[in-house]
Image (tube, rainbow, N blue to C red):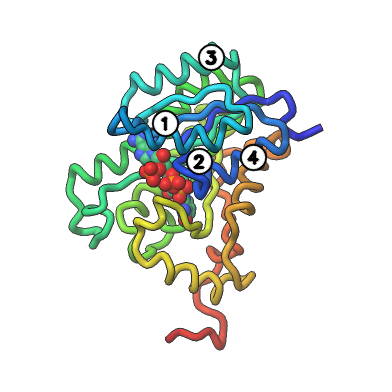
Amino acid sequence: MGLFAGKKGLVFGIANDHSIAWAITEKLHAEGAVMGFTHLPDKDPERPRMEHRLRKLVEPIGAKMIMSCDVQKDDDLDRVFANAKETFGQVDFVLHSIAYAPMEDLKGPTINASRAGFGLSMDISVYSLLAIARRSKEILAPGGSVLTLTYLGGEKVIPGYNIMGVCKAALESLTTYLAFDLGPSGFRINALSAGPIKTLSSSAVGEFDTMLKLYNGMSPMRRNVSAEEVGKTGMYLLSDLASGVTGETLHVDAGFHVMGAPPAGMNLA
Ligand code: 0WD
């Protein structure tokens, strides 16, 4: 029997088959989880590309719910959670794998970010976790768990990550405060800090290829991580195996985050 046999969950943030949320979903499905999914609203309802891309992936794994949701809209979130309650009654886990910053503010330098761009990035990338956690609290089953995705750029300066790094710092702090709020109900919330994975979002972040080379040369394991490895640990954090873990930011990055200088002999050219 799978770890998630009889378990139900909600997944926010699958854009396509490269999305980290999809890698985690595949592992959850393999362990028996049944899930509902949301996608960004399509700009042109005549050509629902976001919905089609999501449907193609999740219908074959028995999706119980597929809805559009812009996390900036309380009405959208209310609709999704009302529907989840109707469909599932209670859910055992909720995955938040969402981030956004306008390109003109993301590309830096950070000091030039606009007030509006900063606010928008914080709203979508950080406040959305709070909004989702608050609604999750109402429908989580005993032992329920929430997971979000973060990156080292929230702890250290990663050139090119810019205001998204500031968002991730806030997201990681928020995870600890939400852990405190959810804990008395027996619910957990954690963040998974993933190494660089090629996805739609990450291609918007500068220097991505350089980062990949850096991980190969500098991480203790001398390599980067795969989406599958992120998927496995994401599944673990949402599972009962992590029943004593909350408020944690767990790095899945081949150890890159522990390094302060490159190993001897690393080609720095
Ligand atoms: O290297 C990477 N790819 C890493 C990503 C390393 C470490 C962490 N992360 C984080 C990201 O910051 C994000 O929080 O993982 C999370 C997922 O990122 P991803 O899998 O790299 O990105 P992607 O496949 O693009 O999914 C993010 C999705 C959006 O996709 P697009 O590319 O269409 O913006 O977040 C969703 C959307 O589906 N999203 C929203 N959902 C609802 N409402 C909104 C919104 N307003 N904005 C973006």
Name the secondary structure under disc 3.
Answer: helix
Q: Is residue 7 above or below residue 152?
A: above
The residue that disc 3 covers is 85
Q: How many circles with numbers are drawn on the protein?
A: 4
Q: Which mark is residue 148?
A: 2
Give how far across and how far down residue 203 sits, in percent: 39, 57
Label 2: how many Cα within 10 Å (few below 14, some 14–19, many 20+): many
Label 4: how many Cα within 10 Å (few below 14, some 14–19, many 20+): some
Q: Amino acid at mark 2?
A: Thr
- Residue at 42% x, 31% y is 130
**Depth check: 218 or 8 in front?**
8
Earlier sequence position, callout 2 versus callout 3 = 3
- Which circle, 2 or 1, is nearer the viewer? 2
Earlier sequence position, callout 2 versus callout 1 = 1
The residue that disc 1 covers is 130
Q: Which mark is residue 245?
A: 4
In the rendered view of the protein, which quadrant contains the C terminus? bottom left
Q: Are marks 2 and 3 in contact (CB under 8 Å)?
A: no
Q: Are marks 1 and 3 in contact (CB under 8 Å)?
A: no
Label 1: how many Cα within 10 Å (few below 14, some 14–19, many 20+): some
State the CA–CA distance, disc 1 to disc 3.
19 Å
Q: Is residue 129 above or below residue 158?
A: above
Q: Does residue 20 appear to the left or right of 121 in the view shown?
A: right
State the CA–CA distance, disc 4 to disc 2.
14 Å
Q: Are marks 2 and 1 in contact (CB under 8 Å)?
A: no
Q: Amino acid at mark 4?
A: Val
State the CA–CA distance, disc 4 to disc 3.
26 Å
Earlier sequence position, callout 4 versus callout 3 = 3
Q: Amino acid at mark 3?
A: Lys
Name the secondary structure under disc 1.
Answer: helix
Q: Does residue 150 appear to the left or right of 185 in the view shown?
A: left
- Which circle, 4 or 2, is nearer the viewer? 2
